[in-house]
Image (cartoon, helix red, strand yellow):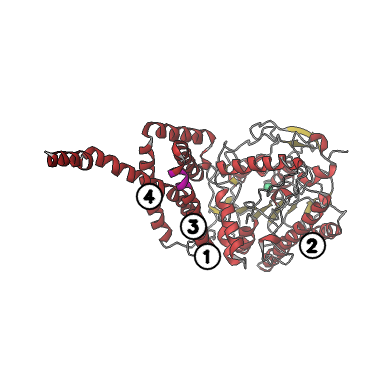
Amino acid sequence: MKNLFQKFHFNTHVESPHSDESFNRSKALNFSILLLPFFTLVTPFLVFLENYSYGIFHLEIIIGILGILLVSLLCSAGMRYGGFIGKNILGFALVTFFLSIQFGSSGEIVFTFMLLGVALLLLIFKDNFLLIAASIFATFFIVTLGQAFAPKGVRNLEFARHQVATGSVPFPRLIHIVLDEHIGLEGIPTDLPEGVTVKKQLREFYEKYGFTTFGGAYSRYFHTVNSLPNLLNFSSASKARMYIGQDDSPNKLLQNTYFERLSQAGYRLNVWWGHHVDYCSHSPVPIDNCIQVPAEGLKTSHRLPLNTFERVQLVFSAYLNLSKIYQRGRDYYQSFRNGIIPYGVSLPSATWDRHTVTALPYLFTLDDLWENILDLPEGNAVFAHLLIPHYPYVANSDCTIKGSINEWKYSSLLFTPHYPFREGMHNTEDSRKTHYQEYFKQVRCIYMKLDELFEKMDHAGIFENAVIVIHGDHGSRIVKREPTIENEYELSREDIVDAYSTLFAVKFPNQVGYYETQPFPIEFLLQEKVVKPLLEEKGNVLPPDPFVFLRSEDRKILDLKPIPYPITH
Ligand SMILES: [Zn+2]
């Protein structure tokens, strides 16, 4: 009887299929808790390396993956021992982080629905959610790993050669170069000795090559996404993000009057771009060649003699900033950090992730672009939007690259490690000066390269007959205060000039250039001084009133506020 009872007891407690299942389930749940954080965190990192063709076998990547492993183990511990809240909140946060990296560019509305979807699934499936998620992310991880090891092709930055359409009158080659963040000649601060020299050198450079230079040119907008779409449509809309879709990254240009008119006249179009505005995917007219300079160009940092720690910083700056959720968290931290400074508490400034290589890929691929220009048949136009002399100021005057990311400078103190908080000021008197000194080095590097291009074109006998337009899209933006509606009454004349003054120079075949100081907006100059003479259109338009637009700090407010340019106080 006793044996029988023991047997029965044994059976119910150990061999019962139900109990066995719950034991296995809790084992599986613990296993998911251990694996889920690692797979959700490492998979988007591998996808990121794949998208940037960065490669895995680098010391900085091994260190990065070990760092991710450490964070994953901490998350696993939090989920295992943090009770209901630890398990669910961390599970939700991990999946959210993953989605924000993978689908961050899909727009806020889509993203909010995704988050609601995750929350709903978590409510319905409870613990099963973690089991399901772990299996999905494990699969995703294995697929990604397979891709990461697959051999990569080399990107070709060459325009495909083609014949000019038969029967069309060959137009002169049109070389249109946008130098992002290039200040106008009259805007260059001459209270700095380097400014006086650079202004003189630039004026002489354009004179030497027969350009007409509009030293007083300015953009009506502080941001590229407003400046260039309006310029290309010869407009000055008082709404932000005209001609480009909402929440798209990169911003797809939906209307392009300039390209349409060139195309209608018979020009073949070739585009070279990389950031901010995608000129090709929604172009109203065919584009023969559209070359995108590798996004972020992180891979180009391989060529630099940086130390491993700097490489880790560069990689993680680019990676983390893909997540809008992360960016928002970082911004909250920064506001909190600034808010408690008056109480004598100084936390580290959130600048560890502000390193970017933006200008580098453009500098490294200039020679390829020059080759394409030299090969360009008549009847072709090339439109190149280059993020130089845009920050970071990585180049010396002779175009050698500064060997440490600590020497790279930015337009604002906000990007500078150990940012001394001064009520939202972008620059002090001193930092404005030092930032301009570094900016001028990058400007000089570009002119060294442009000089090489023009010499080569001249040598090939194609310089004189080419039409060349070179201009900026806004000022150097080395401002003390950002030109926003909120800051309107604190802005100085100097701020407005630093923000909006921009380059505009144009050269036509067999023309004597001149220098003009009057303040003309760039959309007027493109229309009147480039398109009309090029396409032999008639009629004259009076220069419009000089004004620029301020934008609200609240990015959701799209209405812009016009103020006179330049202001007099
Ligand atoms: Zn810009």
Q: Of the residues tagged 2 and 4, which is closer to the observer?
A: 4
How many residues crowd mark 4 within 10 Å: few (<14), some (14–19), many (20+)? some
* Mark found first going from the N terminus, 3 or 1: 1
* Mark found first going from the N terminus, 2 or 4: 4
Report if the beta carbon of the residue with label 4 is closer than 8 angstroms to ligand 1.
no
Return the residue at label 2. 208
Q: Label for residue 65?
A: 3
What residue type is disc 1 on? Leu
Query: Magenta span has 77?
Result: yes
* Mark found first going from the N terminus, 1 or 4: 1
How many residues crowd mark 1 within 10 Å: few (<14), some (14–19), many (20+)? few
* Mark found first going from the N terminus, 2 or 1: 1
* Mark found first going from the N terminus, 4 or 3: 3
Instruction: Give the Cα distance between marks 2 and 4.
Output: 62 Å
Q: Which residues are magenta?
A: 75-80
Helix or strand or loop: what does disc 4 sit on?
helix
Residue 213 place in picture, x, y as percent: 79, 52
* Mark found first going from the N terminus, 3 or 2: 3
Q: Quadrant of the N terminus?
A: top left
Residue 173 place in picture, x, y as percent: 64, 56
Q: Label for residue 59?
A: 1
